[in-house]
Image (cartoon, rainbow, N blue to C red):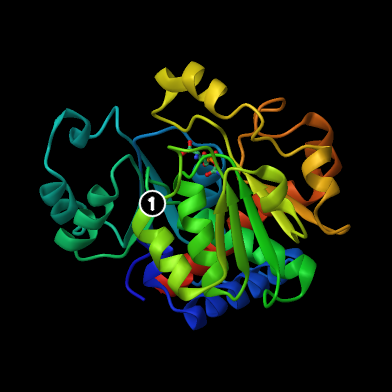
């Protein structure tokens, strides 16, 4: 494993290996054990979009591993003024040991890896969010013990989260159902891959998708960069909500996960959110542990 550009690049064994190391690092942190796996290493973090969890967990994670992280905002970098990614990649490769990037186009992340000579980690693009899904898988395994035979349901926009979740779930042996309105389906190539490689259903019916679910996942109706579509999306997604009704057809011990930030009253009700807050905030914490594992695997 040289980079983390998208989940599809990782084998099931590689994912297990990251999750196992993440569990170990979480345990060590709880026990107060500090190991400087990345002493002297520097991670550059390029952000072309906002972030709370990704920024803080990567920065704290590097510190806890004995390294350091540089926050590089689009507003300050020359990349924000049009310097080509090919040049940025070759320059940063001479200073840094790894780059985490959050941006719009997946191609930019792929180009950074192609032209640079250091590991690149995708911290979210319009296409996918692999770091989030590693933390999600970690949280599911903590609570359910294993993945085999579980059903994961995604309710809402077939966006970056849906794209990564379906790949992660199917790779790990879960079945995956998505309920989304027409015109908001996930990436068609990934849908074809999921149909071929696992138990995948796509419907516009929330209750059908949530039936017998072990994990229900949702995300915002309008992602970063789609602010202007907010009104249209509110209409398109009305009814695509994780609420008591959706939960009533799921398994009695169904988990609810959300990558956050959450919009109560839109994709999830305040009641369901609060009833599952333990799971959702454990999931957010696990970003730290899962990413530390990725950093150790790539940068050590
Ligand atoms: N879930 C997630 O990636 O959160 P941030 O946008 O706050 O980083
Ligand atoms: N789909 C959301 C995820 C945020 C973590 C977005 O891209 O804004």
Residue 147 image-quadrant placement? bottom right
**Residue at 65%, 49% in the rendered image:** 217
* Relative horizontal placement of residue 78, taking residue 21 as reference (left or right): left
How many residues crowd mark 1 within 10 Å: few (<14), some (14–19), many (20+)?
Answer: some
Q: Which residue is mark 1?
A: 187
Q: Ligand 1 lies in which image quarter?
A: top right
For the N terminus, the quadrant is bottom left
**Residue at 21%, 59% in the rendered image:** 93
**Residue at 14%, 59% in the rendered image:** 115
Establish whether ligand 2 lies closer than 8 Å to the Cβ of label 1. Answer: no
**Residue at 64%, 44% in the rendered image:** 205
Out of 101 and 200, give the one closest to the viewer.
Answer: 200
**Which x, y percent locates residue 119?**
31, 65
**Which x, y percent locates residue 18?**
54, 74
**Which x, y percent locates residue 148?**
67, 78
Query: Is residue 43 visible in this depiction of the protein?
Result: no
Out of 64 and 206, give the one closest to the viewer.
Answer: 206
Residue 189 image-quadrant placement? bottom left
Query: Is residue 177 visible in this depiction of the protein?
Result: yes
**Which x, y percent locates residue 68?**
44, 54
């Amino acid at each position: 494993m040289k980079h983390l550009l998208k989940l599809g690049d990782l084998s099931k064994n590689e994912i297990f290996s990251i999750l196992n190391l993440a569990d170990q690092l979480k345990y060590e942190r709880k026990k107060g054990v500090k190991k400087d796996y990345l002493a002297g290493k520097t991670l550059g973090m390029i952000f072309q979009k906002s972030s709370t969890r990704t920024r803080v967990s990567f920065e704290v994670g590097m510190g806890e591993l004995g390294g350091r992280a540089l926050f590089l905002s689009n507003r300050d970098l020359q990349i924000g003024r049009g310097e080509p990614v090919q040049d940025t990649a070759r320059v940063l490769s001479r200073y840094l040991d790894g780059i985490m990037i959050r941006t719009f186009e997946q191609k930019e992340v792929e180009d950074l890896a192609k032209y640079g000579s250091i590991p690149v980690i995708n911290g979210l693009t319009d296409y996918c969010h692999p770091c989030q899904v590693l933390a999600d898988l970690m949280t599911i395994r903590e609570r359910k013990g294993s993945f085999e035979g579980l059903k994961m349901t995604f309710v809402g926009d077939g966006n970056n989260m849906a794209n990564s979740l379906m790949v992660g779930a199917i790779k790990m042996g879960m079945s995956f159902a998505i309920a989304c309105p027409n015109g908001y389906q996930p990436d068609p190539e990934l849908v074809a891959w999921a149909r071929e490689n696992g138990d995948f259903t796509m419907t516009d019916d929330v209750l059908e998708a949530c039936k017998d679910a072990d994990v229900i996942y949702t995300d915002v109706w309008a992602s970063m960069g789609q602010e202007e579509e907010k009104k249209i999306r509110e209409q398109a997604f009305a009814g695509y909500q994780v609420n008591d009704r959706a939960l009533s057809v799921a398994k009695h011990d169904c988990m609810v996960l959300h990558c956050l930030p959450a919009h109560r009253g839109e994709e999830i009700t305040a009641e369901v959110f609060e009833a599952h807050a333990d799971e959702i905030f454990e999931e957010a914490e696990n970003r730290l542990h899962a990413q530390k594992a990725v950093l150790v695997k790539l940068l050590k």
